[in-house]
Image (spheres, rainbow, N blue to C red):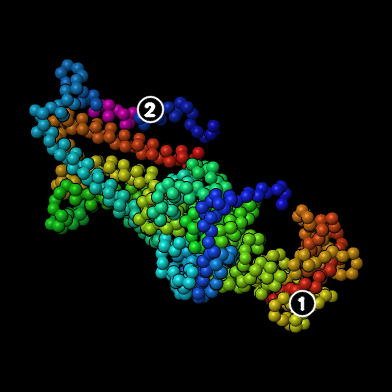
């Protein structure tokens, strides 16, 4: 956001064995996956159908079961019920090493005793690929993540971002049927994180590999996914494109988790809800009686006259815009997103207006 | 410098006193073995390799042979039974670890002579099934080295995230054999080496169990020879100490190589 992030070009298709052999992806299906840890049920019959070549994120707070779902898909956890299908075939009883998957982990998982090239070639060598051929393909995979010049280094000589890039190359080099990403960016600092996130997406699109991405960072999920499955307490609350989730959250939980919202009181009137003097369409379902309404900051404006009177609590400069927290006369806190040129300061008196965009509601507690 | 650290002089005094505690007996032993004729001579050292006296020292060489064989079998038990079990407990049954640790550290608190009371009837069975070969004593030694070997290996296990490494290797298509041999073992290298060397040192120094079970090993043979030739016993003792000293240095170097690599 502050200084430019360099965008690295991918190698040309003809020069890279991985790109040349890019496929069309494999269908991945979760069918009624149930998983218990002792007496605690962490997955309640998870159903999810991922199209070939699709990039799907499992998004949710920690403990929602997203990592467990990924580990069941990888075969690192045995489900207590249900089935996992890869390309239409049930792989529930196939051990991890025979599932033909590539996986990148949250913690650094490169083998400390092997050089970058040998780390990358590890999967090929396990598949009995000859040493020279494995080295050539590993080199191509490293070129894909822009690290072929570090092939002779040991993992401890690399930065965190470089290690995760190598881990990505290592996961992709065997041309697996599905790529599993278990919060691979969470240990990285903000800038590297955005850079690697976008790079993962570009490589994924070029290779056409079906990808499941686990994250608790909604911004990350919104940025790269074809579809996002928002999970909570072992269930999928909603699955949809990033736009669908953001503009029409099916449940209050999704509204609260995806994007930023202010919770304000309203009165349900069927397909609309009344908030102060405005009548807003309800995104999903109907609302009656006293409800709480999720207001997006970008749907609230500062106005010169009319609207509702409020006092500025804090205001944050975010580059092209400003986000300001105000308190209305009736004591409700509302976030307003407005142009950076509209400068406000603590204790300023302002007036706000709400745009008639669809909103999510939940019953008043 | 740390204000609470002892002064340079204090450190030297402490160092010299502690050093003397170890060096004086060894030096005395060395001087004792060099005694002969009017002044110093190497006659007692040379005697060990004198064919004319071979019969006298035969028990020591036989005992040393047995001890080395025992060391090899004991190290094999540590590397192929204890280490994989520890990895298994760490990866698959972490809840068993406290109990496992207690069990493994137990032998250190049980005097060897008490162990033998329990071992004696078991060795009657072992004798019937596997014979009374010297190597069978390795089963008992496998127990006595457990606490030392466990500590050495556990330090390495705790230093590496072997769970993630194992999962990464599995996801890349490695079977359990490849996971153990190609991923976990190389990363536990320093711990496995230290455990092996400590085991060798313990086995070469063990006397009580071998003696009470009537087995001839290095230490029991020394006692036998001492009765006829005190000089020879002293020479062998010095050699054994020197060997243990070299082992310790090798362990230290292995550990340093490891930390040096991690720090760079």
x%, y% of residue A244?
68, 70
Q: Chain of mark 2?
A: B
Segment tinted magenta in the rendering: B20-29
Marking on residue B104: none
* Residue identified by numbered label 1: A281
Give the distance between the C-alpha atoms of the residues marked 2 and 1, in whole angstroms.
Answer: 88 Å
Q: Chain of mark 1?
A: A
Magenta-drawn stretch contains B98: no
x%, y% of residue A163?
53, 49
Mark 2 secondary-structure assignment: helix
* Disc number lying in front (2 or 1): 1
Crowd rating for badge 2 (residues with CA inside 10 Å; few <14, some 14–19, many 20+): few
Q: Nearer the viewer, residue B134 or B98?
A: B134
x%, y% of residue B251?
36, 39
**Circles 2 and 1 on the same chain:** no
Name the residue: 55% across, 46% down.
A147
Is residue A166 visible to the viewer in this orientation of the structure?
no
Marking on residue B16: 2
Q: Tell me if B143 is positioned left or right of B181 in this view.
A: left
Name the residue: 49% across, 41% down.
A152
Crowd rating for badge 1 (residues with CA inside 10 Å; few <14, some 14–19, many 20+): many
């Amino acid at each position: 956001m502050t200084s430019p992030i360099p965008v690295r070009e991918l190698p040309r298709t003809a020069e890279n064995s991985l790109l040349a052999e890019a496929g069309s992806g494999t269908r991945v299906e979760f069918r009624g996956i149930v998983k218990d840890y002792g007496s605690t049920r962490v997955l309640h019959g998870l159903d999810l159908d991922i199209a070939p070549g699709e990039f799907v994120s499992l998004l949710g707070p920690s403990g929602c079961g997203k990592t467990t779902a990924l580990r069941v898909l990888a075969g690192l956890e045995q489900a207590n019920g249900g089935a996992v299908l890869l390309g239409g075939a049930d792989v529930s009883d196939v051990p991890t090493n025979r599932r033909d998957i590539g996986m990148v982990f949250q913690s650094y998982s490169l083998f400390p005793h092997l050089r970058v090239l040998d780390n990358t070639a590890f999967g090929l060598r396990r598949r009995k690929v000859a040493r020279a051929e494995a080295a050539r393909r590993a080199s191509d995979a490293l070129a894909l993540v822009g690290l072929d010049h570090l092939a002779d280094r040991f993992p401890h000589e690399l930065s965190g971002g470089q290690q995760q890039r190598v881990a990505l190359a290592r996961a992709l080099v065997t041309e697996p049927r599905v790529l599993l990403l278990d919060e691979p960016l969470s240990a990285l600092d903000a800038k590297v994180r955005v850079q690697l996130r976008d790079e993962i997406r570009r490589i994924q699109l070029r290779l056409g590999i079906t990808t499941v991405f686990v994250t608790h960072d909604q911004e990350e999920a919104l940025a790269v996914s074809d579809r996002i499955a928002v999970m909570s307490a072992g269930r999928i609350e909603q699955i949809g494109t990033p736009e669908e989730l953001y503009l029409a959250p099916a449940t209050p939980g999704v509204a609260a988790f995806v994007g930023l919202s202010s919770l304000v009181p309203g009165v349900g009137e069927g397909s609309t809800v009344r908030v102060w003097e405005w009548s807003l369409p309800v995104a999903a379902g109907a609302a009656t009686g006293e409800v709480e309404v999720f207001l997006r900051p970008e749907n609230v404006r500062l106005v010169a006259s009319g609207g509702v009177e409020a006092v500025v609590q804090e205001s944050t400069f975010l580059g092209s815009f400003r986000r300001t927290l105000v308190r209305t006369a009736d004591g409700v806190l509302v976030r307003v997103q407005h142009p950076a040129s509209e400068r406000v300061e603590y204790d300023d008196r302002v007036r706000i207006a709400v745009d008639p965009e669809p909103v999510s509601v939940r019953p008043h507690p | 410098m740390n204000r609470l650290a002892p002064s340079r002089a204090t450190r030297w005094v402490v160092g010299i006193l502690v050093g003397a505690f170890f060096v004086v007996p060894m030096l005395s032993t060395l001087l004792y073995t060099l005694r002969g004729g009017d002044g110093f001579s190497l006659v007692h050292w040379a005697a060990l390799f004198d064919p004319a006296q071979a019969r006298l020292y035969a028990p020591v060489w036989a005992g040393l042979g047995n001890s080395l064989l025992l060391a090899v079998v004991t190290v094999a038990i540590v590397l192929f039974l204890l280490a994989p079990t520890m990895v298994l407990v760490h990866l698959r049954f972490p809840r068993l670890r406290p109990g496992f640790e207690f069990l493994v550290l137990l032998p250190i608190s049980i005097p060897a002579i008490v162990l033998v009371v329990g071992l004696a009837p078991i060795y009657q069975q072992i004798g019937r099934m596997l014979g009374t070969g010297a190597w069978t004593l390795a089963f008992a030694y496998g127990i006595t080295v457990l606490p030392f070997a466990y500590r050495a290996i556990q330090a390495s296990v705790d230093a590496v995230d072997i769970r993630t490494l194992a999962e990464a290797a599995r996801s890349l298509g490695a079977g359990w054999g490849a996971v153990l041999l190609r991923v976990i073992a190389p990363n536990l290298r320093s711990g496995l080496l230290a455990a092996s060397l400590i085991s060798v040192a313990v086995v070469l120094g063990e006397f009580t169990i071998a003696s009470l079970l009537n087995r001839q090993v290095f230490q029991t043979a020394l006692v036998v020879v001492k009765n006829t030739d005190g000089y020879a016993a002293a020479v062998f003792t010095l050699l054994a100490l020197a060997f243990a000293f070299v082992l310790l240095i090798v362990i230290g170097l292995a550990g340093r190589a490891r930390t040096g690599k991690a720090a760079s």
